[in-house]
Amino acid sequence: MTLEELQNFLDSEDNVHGLDSVATHGFLTATIVGMPLPNWLSLLFEGQESKVNVEVKAAITAWREALLEDIHSEEGIALPLDIDDDSGEMDFSPESELTAWSIGFVDAMYGDENVDWFSDEENSEDVAMLTLPMMVFSGIDTIDGEEDEDLAAIRRDEDALAQMANSIEGNLSELFLLFHTTD
């Protein structure tokens, strides 16, 4: 199964247990740059990976490996997001690809209660700052219809949103270095 075939499957109604292709990219990215997530495949498919076609699981694993190679290269991980060709602007709406990607990322980040990205007090502030854009764009802070006031203020500031969106790719590299290298 090619990557394009996998992405088509993920974006189809046949994908009953997983995220769409953009959110899956965010999820896989988080499993690479963040704390090790041993049960990532199970979490990706909501504990239903045994019901997912073997070819799909193999293609997902291959995609994850390709993203890992990207982070090891000088390229880093590129976000799979469309930017308006005319204006050069990105869509920050709740229905945007950026939101979907961020939801996938945050799903992996908090997917296993035994994996705490903030457990190292020495690095927890850095982790919070580096993951802030993903938190803002995911909208995950909304509880019972009430969103965090500070994050809501950021969401109303187009310039802040643009800066955050532009920082994500660099933040991914920084997170990878933070979690996967020693001083």
Image: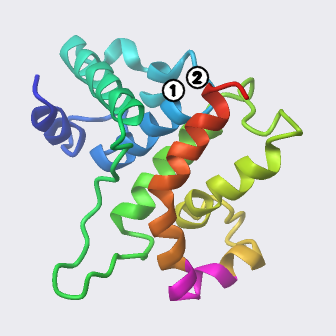
Q: CA distance from mark 2 to mark 1?
A: 9 Å
> In front here: 62 or 174?
174
The residue under the point 34% across, 76% down is 90
Tell me the kind of residue under disc 1: Leu
The residue wearing badge 1 is: 43
Residue 66 appears in view: yes
**Magenta region's main secondary structure?**
helix
Residue in the picture at 60% in, 35% down:
177
- The C terminus - image quarter: top right
Q: Residues within 10 Å of mark 2 (few under 14, many from 20)?
A: some
Q: Is residue 156 above or below residue 10?
A: below
The image shows residue 9 at horizontal and vertical percentages of 17, 36
| 91 left or right, relative to 107 | left
Is 156 one of the magenta-colored residues?
A: yes
State which region is magenta.
Answer: 153-160
Residue 157 percent location from the top left of the image: 58, 88
Question: From where the camera sits, is residue 102 visible?
Answer: no
- Looking at the picture, tell me which residue is in the foreground, 132 or 111: 132
> Is 150 part of what is drawn in magenta?
no
The colour scheme of the drawn protein is rainbow
The residue lying toward the viewer, choosing from 57 and 172, is 172
User: How far across and how far down the image is residue 7, in percent?
Assistant: 19, 39
